[in-house]
């Protein structure tokens, strides 16, 4: 007599309780999914329009005041490799000052369209803007391998500036100039949750400390009645307001672009800011259902605004301001998402844009390879921004 291993018997038991549906991450609690759907419909289709945009802002739950920068200062100016740059700082009203690079074509004095360049998450919080933009000095050495892996070795914000844009690249909550200092992380006992090794660089050690720290930050946000996604989005709206107020920017021609966590920021900024005329979302699109059993554990809290699935799905956020133009770029071998999830999100986005009679304003492209924003993808993204932002 052959007896199935215990884990197979358990799986069969779970599947029988769920009409054939088993979730490995939930095990015997797979039927929690059905129970939740009986409690309320999960991820209903949230149609484009002001009502959905209002519900999104309510869900993000962070509005400490007008989304405008305070006490703006220009700290440094430079010209290098065909780009004029500025290091600008401001306060968002809490925490350390935000640092941002402003980049534009060298010597150009007229008003230009503008783009907010949104750095990624990358499990790399020691630096922010430096991951996608070159400042006055050489990029930190540890940035080189990171850019090679994800950006084809390119500081794409500088390249975009050369093509006729004012590009703003701000640090955001938890990254770069906005990061928590190491002593605060250690005071919270974070070091007890990370591996010990004497061979890691200080930057790598810091990034490892930040992995469990984001969960702590989300818990504090919950205690404070807000969300991590809401704080990040508020700061991106502050940055957009700064860009809109510059004399060298065409204030009605502002876009945004970002990979991965930057793509999530682009999704949220597109959904919440009426100043964004066109958005590019790279490596950051799926339906929530297709995240089940797939990388929920390693995705940032940015993609999980508390209670949003009661009102809509992740693609609904990107589409809530339709017909505002959106491009979504997916990598077919991206380990962070399933092909099924990317395809389902594409169909949902297309449905929303069809519903408002603006199907041509939504573009979705699929590329070979892993999680990245390589040169062909950058070329397509820049062309999309040109189409909708350049006169």
Image (cartoon, rainbow, N blue to C red):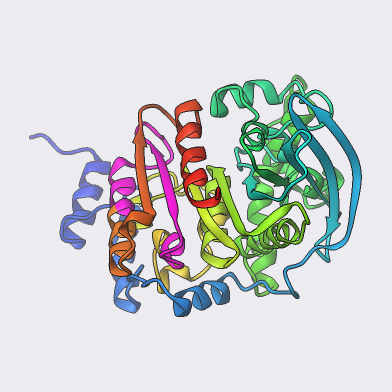
Q: Position of residue 136 (x, y in %)?
A: 84, 30
Q: Position of residue 376 (x, y in %)?
A: 45, 28
Q: Position of residue 307 (x, y in %)?
A: 49, 71
Question: Any magenta on residue 171?
Answer: no
Residue at x 21%, y 46% (from the top left corner): 9
Residue at x 42%, y 68% (from the top left corner): 309
Residue at x 71%, y 62% (from the top left corner): 241
Q: Position of residue 87 (x, y in %)?
A: 84, 42
Which residue is nearer to you in this view: 191 or 73?
73
290 to 49, vertically: above or below: above
Left or right of residue 376: residue 194: right
Of the 4 image quadrants, the one containing the N terminus is top left
Give the tally of numbered discs: 0
Magenta range is: 317-346
16 to 296, vertically: above or below: below
Residue at x 55%, y 53% (from the top left corner): 266
Which residue is nearer to you in this view: 91 or 50?
50
In this orientation, does residue 3 appear?
yes
């Amino acid at each position: 007599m052959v007896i199935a291993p215990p884990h197979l018997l358990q799986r069969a038991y779970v599947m029988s309780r769920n009409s054939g549906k088993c979730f490995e991450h939930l095990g015997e609690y797979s039927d929690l999914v059905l129970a939740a759907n009986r409690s309320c419909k999960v991820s209903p289709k949230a149609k484009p329009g002001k009502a959905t945009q209002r519900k999104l802002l309510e869900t993000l739950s962070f509005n400490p005041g007008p989304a405008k920068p305070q006490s703006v200062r220009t700290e440094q100016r430079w010209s290098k490799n065909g780009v004029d740059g500025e290091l600008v700082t401001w306060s968002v009203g809490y925490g350390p000052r935000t640092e941002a690079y402003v980049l534009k074509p060298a010597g150009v004095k007229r008003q230009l369209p503008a783009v907010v360049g949104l750095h990624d998450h990358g499990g790399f919080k020691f630096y922010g803007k430096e991951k996608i933009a070159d400042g006055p000095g050489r990029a930190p050495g540890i940035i080189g391998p990171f850019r090679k892996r994800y950006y084809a070795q390119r500081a794409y914000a500088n390249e975009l500036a050369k093509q006729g844009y004012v590009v703003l690249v701000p640090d955001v909550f938890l990254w770069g100039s906005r990061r928590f200092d190491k002593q605060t992380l250690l005071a919270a006992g974070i070091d007890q949750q990370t591996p010990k090794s004497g061979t890691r660089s200080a930057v790598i050690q810091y990034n490892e400390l930040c992995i469990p720290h984001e969960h702590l930050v989300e818990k504090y946000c919950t205690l404070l009645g807000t969300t991590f996604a809401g704080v990040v989005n508020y700061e991106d709206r502050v940055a957009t307001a700064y860009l809109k107020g510059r004399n060298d920017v065409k204030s009605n021609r502002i876009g945004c672009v970002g990979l991965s966590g930057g793509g999530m920021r682009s999704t949220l900024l597109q959904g919440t800011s009426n100043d964004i005329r066109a958005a590019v979302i790279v490596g950051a699109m799926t339906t929530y259902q297709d995240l089940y059993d797939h990388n929920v554990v390693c995705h940032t809290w940015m993609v999980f605004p508390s209670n949003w699935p009661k009102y809509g799905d992740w693609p609904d956020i990107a589409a809530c301001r339709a017909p505002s133009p959106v491009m979504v770029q997916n990598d077919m071998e991206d380990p962070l998402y399933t092909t099924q999830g990317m395809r389902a999100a594409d169909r949902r986005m297309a449905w929303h844009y069809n519903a408002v009679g603006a199907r041509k304003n939504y573009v979705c492209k699929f590329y070979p390879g892993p999680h990245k924003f390589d040169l062909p993808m950058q070329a397509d993204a820049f062309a999309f921004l040109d189409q909708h932002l350049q006169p």
